[in-house]
Amino acid sequence: MRLCRACARVIEGAGCVCGEDLPVEHVELNQLSIAHLDCDAFYASIEKRDDPSLEPHPVIVGGGKRGVVSTCCYVARAYGVRSAMPMFKALKLCPQAKVVHGEMGKYVEEGRTIRRMMEDLTPQVQPLSIDEAFMDLSGTEALHGGSPAQSLIKLQNKIWEERRLTVSIGLSFNKFLAKTASDLDKPRGFSVIGRGEALAFLQSRAVSTLPGVGPAGATALEGNGLKKIGDIRLVGPQRMRALYGDWGAHLFALSMADDPRIVDPNGERKSISSETTFFADVSDIEALEDILWPLCEKVAARCRAAETAGRTLTLKLKDTRFKIVTRRRQLPEPTLLAHRIFETARELLAGDADGRTKYRLIGVGLSDFSDPADADKGDMLDTETPKRAAAEAAIAKARSKFGKDAVQTGRALKAEWDDE
């Protein structure tokens, strides 16, 4: 089956009747309904749209010289700039880049607009962040007068026409492959992975392309001769479980293109978290706390953007043997304060950070969500929490208007100095 990406019509002859020559072709195109939509370089694209003078230039959205890159446009990526890279390194790679501090409030509102456009196609939309989501378009053919692929092409074009932003779409039969497909042809890509080709497609891909496999995980897999996804398939599920436990069994399932997860519209707020993998293993508790603080700030910011607060806090650690330790604590009331998240996480961290055990990853998250109006009220004996809530709300407002570096805490500045 061939569809025109300009008008979503079925192409039956040599070309489309609309006169454009932008086909997408796949034998299973009419049979697939699980999609992943990812906005292309979202923050940077919004900045270029709103300020046309930036269009020809490499653009970096992020903090000041001692901050990190939030995202960057594809021009900057050609110089090697990447998200989460320290700003001073990014500017060494691309000194001519235009640096924009960004406005999170603007990005959140744009993300909500695009999400509403997705929900016009199907109620089965599961956001992953403000700029990407899964969709299940099963059973929507009669409603929209065309296949899911045709509806997705129309959506992609509508987002460009109405918002002047490009998105990339992956279409497949499960979430893992849909997300994989959306990364294949950026920007403004439309890629398809069907059942008939899935195993062959995965066979030669690097293990690092599997979800949840970072640089350290890839090194561990490669140490056992598992360089390609096909290698995982060859060793079998029992060996993978013996080597890596549940993680190994999960990777084997993915190597077989097996992902039973459904698109869950309520899955967005099961947890809000942030984690980071270190360049070098860390055992010192003060160093771990310095890394933990900006993660707590990110979780707090994401809670504000999602207009929610969490009651259950989770601390995650991964040691050099890839053993994952999770600690949870129920809070006396919901919170979205970075300070309260940090203080609770630091108490949990003290139980495992003994100065001898080396860790390669730390993360923190909130779950068990409720209305933010019920959060951080304190009581007659706790007058500091409402004051802290007011202070953090003011900081968030300043950062939304003037950029992340508008207000910095002493601990955050210390962490940035240590990074350099």
Image (cartoon, grey):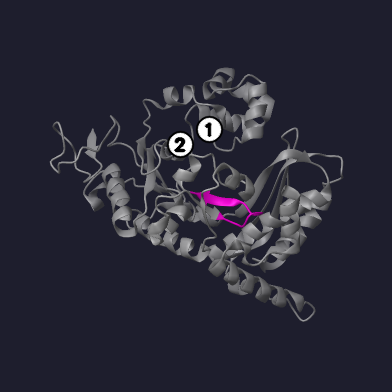
Compared to 382, does 348 lie above or below?
above
Q: In the rendering, which numbered label is found on residue 209?
A: 1
Q: Position of residue 25 (x, y in %)?
A: 27, 32
Residue 246 in view (yes/no): no
Considering every residue shown, the one lying at the far bottom of the view is 380
Q: In the rendering, which numbered label is found on residue 169?
A: none
| Mark 1–mark 2 distance (CA, rounded to whole Å) | 8 Å
Q: Amino acid at mark 2?
A: Thr
Considering every residue shown, the one lying at the far front of the view is 96
Q: Position of residue 305 (x, y in %)?
A: 54, 64
Which of 99 and 226 lies nearest the eye of the viewer?
99
> In the rendered image, which quarter contains the N terminus?
top left
How would you rate the neighbour count of disc 2 (Cα within 10 Å): few for under 14, some for 14-19, many for 20 or more?
Answer: many
Q: Amino acid at mark 1?
A: Thr
Residue at image position (66%, 76%) is 390
Tell me, yes or no, whether the highlighted magenta stretch contains residue 67: yes
Q: Tell me, yes or no, whether the two marked residues, 1 and 2, touch with CB atoms within 8 Å.
A: yes
45 to the left or right of 304: left
Task: State the extent of the magenta-drawn residues as a range.
Answer: 62-72
Compared to 103, does 315 lie above or below?
above
Residue at image position (71%, 34%) is 322
Residue at image position (76%, 38%) is 281
Q: Position of residue 232 (x, y in %)?
A: 57, 23
The residue that mark 2 highlights is: 180
When asked about the image quadrant of residue 277, the answer is top right
When asked about the image quadrant of residue 359, the answer is top right
